[in-house]
Image (cartoon, helix red, strand yellow):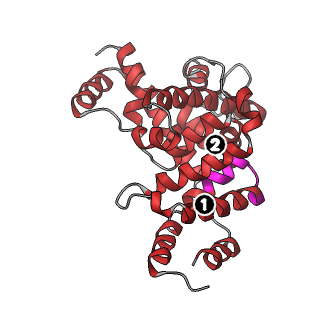
Amino acid sequence: MNCSDCKDKLDRYVDRELNNTEVLELKLHLEGCPPCADHYEFQAHLKRLVKVSCDRDKVPAAFREKLRQILL
Amino acid sequence: MAESPARTAFAEEALTHLDTLYRGALRLTRDPDQAQDLVQEAYLRALRYQHSYQPGTNMKAWLFAIMRNLFWDRFKGSRKEDVSLDDVGEFVLYDKLRDEGAKPEADVLDKLAASEVVAAVEKLPPLHREVVLLVDVEGFSYKDAAQTLGVPIGTVMSRLHRARQQLQRSLYDYAVESGIVRASGTSQVPQQ
């Protein structure tokens, strides 16, 4: 695998969408290619950051109760 | 009103996905009141169409699909101009920072406030925002996201890729505005 292939597969790797063979190939490339490994770390970090930031919002208790009243 | 046990059980199960639906509605509408209206309407519709849900399949995806379809029904008028995102290039934020010797994760990403990240997500056009919500925030597979959105997997992948590039662009702008980096891309954090 070269850097271009790696770049093409990076989104799918970060999203755990590659098959086992592709994961092994990509891991092998990342181990020997610090620039691609840095790209990967950055992408993975950004994905985590988006999740953690958006996860902070909680359903207001009054709304949860209102829904329960309506639906149950 | 006394509800049938089957309907109550269905509603109980549906309500276990309330957090996901509310977060999604909040990001799509960008307004807590509208988000609550949207979620409530989605739940009422879900109960009305309970018969079309196949037990054992992904209820979270099914509910999210109902909600986002309602959202698009309401905002149909703005759909056309919303479709595209300009190509902003690859690894915008990363490229701008790494050449300066900064550590993009430690020096920049870790210093961005969560509210700035949320603002960057909300700045994405809705068609791209919903893919980020499903895949990055809620952990949907590409397949489930594609099914939820009614598009091919390739469309999920391309929207996600574009959305991430745009996110990096927005976060770079925030980082400059808030003084985390200088406009040239140099991190202001002292280097080891």
Above or below, A6 against B70 in this view is above
Residue B29 painted magenta: yes
What is the CA distance from the residue labelled 1 to the residue labelled 2? 41 Å
Indicate which label's residue lies in the foreground, 1 or 2. Answer: 1
Secondary structure under tag 2 reads helix
| Image quadrant where one finds the N terminus of chain A | top left
Residue B108: name its quadrant: top right
Q: Nearer the viewer, residue A66 or B161?
A: A66
The vertical placement of B115 against A58, above or below, is: above
Q: Which residue lies furthest to the bottom in this view?
A: B2
Badge 1 marks a residue whose secondary structure is helix
Question: Is residue B57 found left or right of B103 in the rendered image?
Answer: left
Labels 1 and 2 touching (C-beta < 8 A) = no
Q: Mark 1 lies on which chain?
A: B
What x and y, as percent, mark residue A37? 39, 27
Please tell me which residue is depicted at 67% across the width and 61% down the height of the picture. B41
Instruction: Indicate whether B192 appears above or below A61.
Output: above
Residue B111: give its label: 2
Q: In which quarter of the image is residue A55?
A: bottom right
Q: Which residue range is magenta in the image?
A: B23-33
Left or right side of B176 for B149: left
